[in-house]
Image: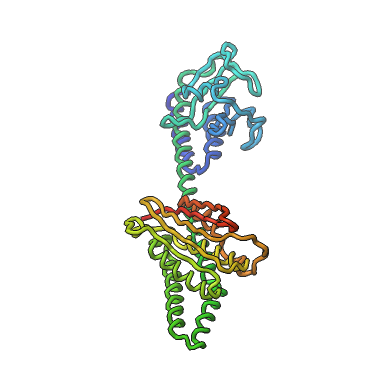
Amino acid sequence: MNSEQFEDILIYFSKSLMGKENEEDILWDLAKNCISKLGFVDCVIYLVDQNRQLLVQKAAYGPKNPKDKALYNPVSISMGEGITGNVAKTRRAALIPDTSKDPRYIEDDANRLSEICVPIVHENHLYGVIDCEHPEKCYFNERHLKMLSAIASICAIKIKSVRAGQEVLKKQEKLLKIREEMLELKVLALNSQLNPHFLFNSLNAIQYFVTSEKKKLALEYLSTFSRLIRFYLRQLGNDTVSLYNEIDMLHWYLKLQKLRYDDSFDYVIAMEKSSETLQEAIIPSFVTHTLFENIIERSMFNQKKGQHFKISFRSTNSEVVLVIQYQEFDSKNTTPPEYRARILKWQDQIKLLNTAKGYNIKNESKIHKIGERWIGNITLTLPNLR
């Protein structure tokens, strides 16, 4: 085979790869078409399994390929094992005129006397190995080695391109999934915050003040209710909120819940005084609301009266820490009403936000005994996203 024929094969292979969009097609095109045009009788192509540090047979031409895109008794080779493994480890091609004199030679399906093996490598990254054997001694020459090395380089560039394209697609799919999950989270949060029981019970409580001629209280709670609903609707399109606005929302929400449950609980919110980081802090939306909704509904479901929530916020340049102290109790009721079962669980919300947005929100719950009372503490660490 002369130089012109070699050049024709390179041009053919380069053009043939243009339409290939996956590694399997690339490797089988190399084995079935390109290698056959070189006049070789046996060839096996390996790819590197990085996790197991193995060379795994993926395509072949000759006895190892009795059927279309099928391998007969495929094997795996450890990096450094045999001639093929040594080429992979050193990333240097090998031309063996007589395998019977090379102790590295490992017989696969049959014993062959000459071998040529080149790494599929680009920019010092190893993708695989092309290994060709022949029953005759000294069959392969330097021209074969040069030709096969050029083919391997073209193959490596194409595999890199395909993998880069696949990574882009994976990132796009991940981004789309994140957007879908965030939209679902917002819908779940809004459904939880605007659940009919909370809305109608709050309105009924306000109506009671109206009918009882307590107009000042009615107006006060109606104003609070309006602020809270406007806040929910305004925040629906936002992933973040200023900490000060979130604390305002928390005041409005807890005030209405107290009204709804006939002052069955009380609360106090403490903040660091004169803290610039607290004033400028930005946190993920609705996380604190979901947490308090879960705590209050759980307390009221278990008919725990006289509950007191001690709430404190502190902030640094990187995080906002919320600590809630409350009285713990033994839960006797195990099956909540249907509407409470549908409320978004705060731990689920945190898991979804951490997965979708990478917020690394942390939470810790502890219970300790003071006298005859069991006191619960929840610490929620949120990222400061300012």
Number of dots carrying numbers: 0
Q: Position of residue 77 (x, y in %)?
A: 59, 26
Name the residue at 58% across, 25% down.
Answer: 78
* Residue 320 figure quarter: bottom left
| Residue 177 in view here | no
Which residue appears farthest toward the top when viewing the image? 101
In depth, the one of 142 and 280 nearer the eye is: 280
Q: Is residue 207 left or right of residue 240?
A: right
Q: Position of residue 47 (x, y in %)?
A: 54, 32
In depth, the one of 129 and 367 nearer the eye is: 367
Q: Position of residue 49 (x, y in %)?
A: 55, 33
259, above or below 343, in the image: below
Q: Position of residue 307 (x, y in %)?
A: 55, 66
Q: Is residue 320 left or right of residue 37?
A: left
| Residue 38 in view here | yes
Name the residue at 53% across, 84% down.
Answer: 208
100, above or below 116, in the image: above
57, above or below 161, in the image: above
* Residue 264 figure quarter: bottom right
Name the residue at 33% across, 57% down.
Answer: 275
Q: Is residue 186 left or right of residue 317?
A: right
192, above or below 112, in the image: below
Image quarter in which the C terminus is found = bottom left
* Residue 113 figure quarter: top right
